[in-house]
Image (spheres, rainbow, N blue to C red):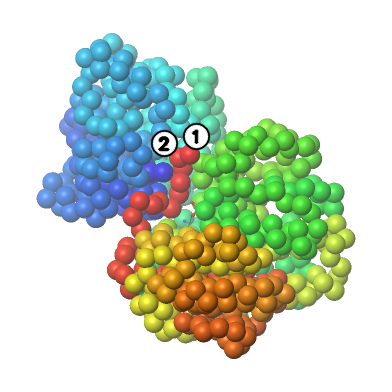
Amino acid sequence: MCGIVGILGSGPVATDLVDALRRLEYRGYDSAGIATVENGHLQRRRAEGKLRNLETRLLTEPLSGRTGIGHTRWATHGRPVERNAHPHMTALVSVVHNGIIENYRELKAELTALGHTFETETDTEAVVHLVSDEMQKGLGPIEAVRVALGRLRGAFALGIIFAGHDDLMIAARQGSPLAIGHGTGEMYLGSDAIALAPFTDTITYLEEGDWAVLRRRGAEIFDKSGTRVERPLIKAVASSLLVDKGNHRHFMAKEIHEQPEVISHTLANYLDMAAGTVNFPALGLDLGGVTRVTVSACGTAYYAGLVGKYWIERYARVPVEIDVASEFRYREPPLGPGGLSVFVSQSGETADTLATLRYCKASGQRIVSVVNVRTSTIARESDAVLPTLAGPEIGVASTKAFTCQLSVLACFAIALGRARGAIGPEQEEELVKALTELPRHISTLLRNEDEYERLAHELSKARDVLYLGRGTSYPLALEGALKLKEISYIHAEGYAAGELKHGPIALIDENVPVIVVAPEDDLFEKTVSNMQEVAARGGQIILISDADPSKAGCKLAAHIRMPKAHQFANPLLYAVPIQLIAYHTAVFMGTDVDQPRNLAKSVTVE
Ligand code: M6R
């Protein structure tokens, strides 16, 4: 987490640093700060909370200087107060950091004993004093950083500037992404290419263990052993441009409404709609020979993977093992040779997903990733990439990325089933048609949001909300609960409808709304029985279904009427009402919908 930037400019850089940080706020917004070299001295401005607080401070206390670094923080070590905000500095050196220095305690003890005074609770400050200490011993800045890097354990992306050195910045990457931007007589550093989009589209990505010496005329890159290396120059794609909210109140609302379009784009990438067939890219392996798939991801992306499991097992007849990425590798699952491992991630930078990818790679699996950011680390470390074409997703709550992930996984299930002979041409055409009708159905759904506003009023009074679903609606129940709790802060849990009577039913009373995701499919009758169990205990049922409400066989507090669609396509369709319920409840409650408390869009720590 955290976003870092650096600029060696031809003029004052403070405004550009803030501009770049604005593009990185999705990585954290607990505090922000910038530091520059001003007349040979290091100066900084920091502010607790969102970037706008730093901007306000800079109005009254501006910073000049052509060399600077900046940071937007998601707190790991130390409370989110100004004292702990980056950049951290001594009189000699200033540092911005993304990641965790795991051995900071021992470094701090050692440096304190040598007379260094620590002012913060952060792990990052150990880096500042370590480099300063080497410089005080007489090393130049480059050599001092080289020695310090050798002492650091953990994951980090670092940007470092030095007092008295106007044309020098050092960058280092181990476990956290870092991009160098090339300008004309100017150089840039950023956690990703999006941060640098206003300045340059010519990017070099540092590789694991790389560190780089930047000057205005260019960059010299070294690998972990200190050997000078060349890394390719890449043209960043235009999707890095900063998007705006259009005429929506929040990014989340805009992104929910973009779904018909981005799902269409994504499906068009994998389907021949006219022919009614999948048109899947070569993955460098014989899909017909795949006998086992593992899927791993975090949060919403994990729930997309869980829907994928139901599809792949049912339609392609291939067993799927799935786990959250933060647990997968700790089980040390035996992975036989020739297996296929699928990773799902919007950002492509999620630390746990990346670590699991590396575990599976080391176990000889073929690595396929479903990612939205094509230049991300997960994409670059995969054998094959299945991009979601959702465009930049800014709201922390994932919406359009989720449905685009589902789109890709649905196409993958058909392609796998066809290759294995589990799906014949007729069924392929039927499933492809089901998907191609989705954007139209979703557009219809998005035309009427009044009922969600009414529902929000009721839900906002609840302390706990339960979500129930069976089959592919079970992951949607999990996703619905996650969406509601992350942006409205109402406690919510998702359960497999059949599990209710094994414990959670004890929670039901007339104050607990129970949102039931139940398309009229082959599992509907069983879910109806579970609804009746809830109704018998006075629970307030909100049914999301295409079935006539009379079929519920019990009193409903509300019914969200869904269009009739093919069972295969339903998870994409039913994702929309659960997003709208969460969105309108959060808006009604006045929370910060796009940047909910304690969260960040890109989770680059384990
Ligand atoms: O970037 P990723 O898809 O790998 O992120 C994984 C989760 O952090 C993410 O899906 C998170 O759960 C959502 N922001 C929730 O809406």
Find residue 43 and report its horizontal and vertical position in percent. Answer: 19, 35
Quadrant the N terminus occupies = top left
Q: Earlier in the sequence, mark 1 or mark 2?
A: 2
The Cα atoms of the two marked residues, 1 and 2, are separated by 8 Å
Find residue 296 and report its horizontal and vertical position in percent. Answer: 62, 48
Residue 310 relative to residue 182: left or right = right
Residue 127 relative to residue 558: left or right = left
546 versus 120 height, above or below: below
Find out whether the residues at labels 1 and 2 contact each other: C-beta distance under 8 Å.
yes
**Dot 1: few (<14), some (14–19), or many (≥20) neighbours within 10 Å?**
many
Rendered image quadrant of residue 169: top left
Residue 331 relative to residue 602: left or right = right
Q: Is residue 271 visible?
A: yes
**Dot 2: few (<14), some (14–19), or many (≥20) neighbours within 10 Å?**
many
Could you tell me the amino acid type at mark 2? Gly
Find residue 315 and report its horizontal and vertical position in percent. Answer: 78, 63
Q: Which residue is mark 1?
A: 175
499 versus 368 height, above or below: below
Q: Residue at x 53, y 33 (%)?
A: 207
Q: Which residue is mark 2?
A: 99
